[in-house]
Amino acid sequence: MEASTASTFSPMRQIQHWIGGASSGGTSSRGGAVYNPATGRQTGEVAFATSADVDAAVEAAKSAFESWRHSALTQRQNVMFSFREMVSARRRELAETLTAEHGKTIDDALGEVQRGLEVIEFACNIAHLLKGDYSEQVSTGVDTYTIRQPLGVVAGITPFNFPTMVPMWMYPIAIACGNTFVLKPSEKDPSTSQLVAEMLAESGLPEGVFNVVHGDKEAVDALITHPDVAAVSFVGSTPIARYIYETGTQHGKRVQALGGAKNHMIVLPDADIELAADAAVSAGYGSAGERCMAISAVVAVGDAGDRLIEGVQARIEKLEVGPGDRPGVEMGPLVTSDHLERVRGYVDSGEKQGALLVADGRDLVVEGHEDGYFLGPTLFDNVITDMSIYTDEIFGPVLSTVRMDHYEEAIRLINENPYGNGTAVFTNDGGAARKFQNEIQVGMVGINVPIPVPLSFYSFGGWKDSIFGSHAIYGPEGVHFYTRQKVVISRWADPLHRGVDLGFPTHG
Ligand code: NAD
């Protein structure tokens, strides 16, 4: 995390907090530099919140909760509907803003906005999922029913790789359920959060219902230990997810913390190899591999390996790498220079540890963008499972191929991996596919689909070290996470006055 004092960067564009319906510079002199990864140049400076700034945001959210929780369900849905229209109309502006700080291509950024928009659309119809159950006459003159109620102030802490979509996995549902929200986005690409805060205000959301605090560990720690924060949604790397879960729950909060990944794609000998090669390249190098659902290990079974490597190699030779806002570019830069160095380090170590480097992206130079954080698509073959390119989440355009003789071994390999976010099998054999969906220890499974991200009316979540907490994110599980169930047992006009009875109540 690159931090400095605000004075170092002026007169840079200042990216501020959003507290109680207005921009706020906060109380800190600390800030972080924001770069355009395609040029390597600093474009802005983001304020880092102190615990006093976090207190102010939580206080604004707490006081807004008092009326927001009593607002009509139709009012909350109407705000979401207006917001949906605004995000849809201004999707290009959001996409360009996020490309300028993240680096991904504009098309990819538009796809990100679209997937976030779908969660907003889901929230437009939240009433359907807030309905309770009703049982009449559970006992004589007694009815039982359930109500789902909001929790209060909810915090969201989000990663750099989907700066628009991942927050949208959280706040539309939390807010539509009647909660108020404090978002702490990634400090690497914070600007779309500011845009979204303004759009929510223009959509009629009352002040204080949605707040943004920028920053680093100081802001995060203040949020996850704050006595007035009822719940925390986190998405990011596994060590931080574990820390957020442990600290948040120790402070009495409901926590869902989604972590990192190492996603495998098995290719069986009977698979359509052309389809599998297209899928491996799309899922391995899309967004420069900076997706939690990116494929990073291809497991080639039997004689699928040679044909697959040939297909992948032919495709990556044609990939256009460059600045994300240039038409025709298919893969942009990595997010920061530190991250570029880290990913290059993995390529160096894979080579030293004896993997076969089939395509080496380290020498790529993008003309006119020599200071950008570019790494070309990189492909390894004959990767062994104790190499760091296999064991670690690289989060870059580096695809490893592991060769296996048997399908059973490939399944075991995935099941023994500590992560369990996404996985895929490529085969034309229905029985093999069914075995995979039945036996694989991973939360999201693709059958001839490399990136199995569910639409907004399902929920998203991995298994094992890819999630901490019992709720997946968005969709029906999101509604359950952001609400508490209350059960009511009522008796009206019961003609039978039975008098005092100290026995345990039974029906009848
Ligand atoms: P990260 O864990 O470094 O940061 C995530 C958030 O935590 C940021 O807001 C950051 O400011 C904050 N943070 C960082 N260090 C902290 C610390 N020591 N204490 C408290 N807060 C801290 O993740 P990232 O690099 O921004 O994002 C990439 C990671 O996110 C990858 O591991 C990727 O797999 C994961 N991810 C997972 C999913 C999923 O759905 N499972 C989705 C997207 C990204």
Image: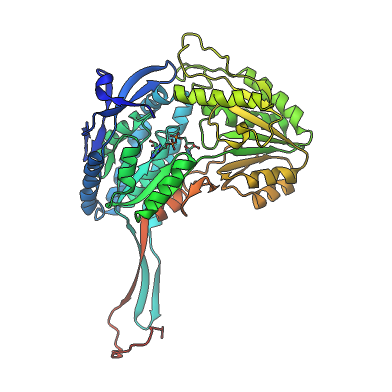
The quadrant in which the N terminus is found is top left
Q: Residue at x 73, y 40 (%)?
A: 428
Which corner quadrant of the figure contains ligand 1?
A: top left
Whether residue 117 appears in this view of the structure is no
Q: Residue at x 47, y 31 (%)?
A: 111
Position of 273 compared to 48: left or right?
right
Whether residue 93 appears in this view of the structure is yes
Looking at the picture, how far across and down is residue 451, in whole percent? 57, 37
Looking at the picture, how far across and down is residue 507, in whole percent? 41, 83
Q: Quadrant of residue 54?
A: top left
Q: Quadrant of residue 195?
A: top left
List the single residue furthest toward the top: 368
Looking at the picture, how far across and down is residue 157, in whole percent? 37, 41
Image label count: 0
The quadrant in which the C terminus is found is bottom left
Looking at the picture, how far across and down is residue 45, in whole percent? 30, 24
Position of 466 compared to 497: left or right?
right
Position of 266 compared to 202: left or right?
right
Q: Quadrant of residue 119?
A: top left
Q: Is residue 195 above or below residue 337?
A: below
Query: Is 277 or 257 nearer to us in this picture?
Result: 257
Query: Is 463 or 438 nearer to us in this picture?
Result: 463
| Colouring | rainbow
Position of 53 compared to 317: left or right?
left
Q: Residue at x 35, y 79 (%)?
A: 142
Q: Residue at x 68, y 20 (%)?
A: 314
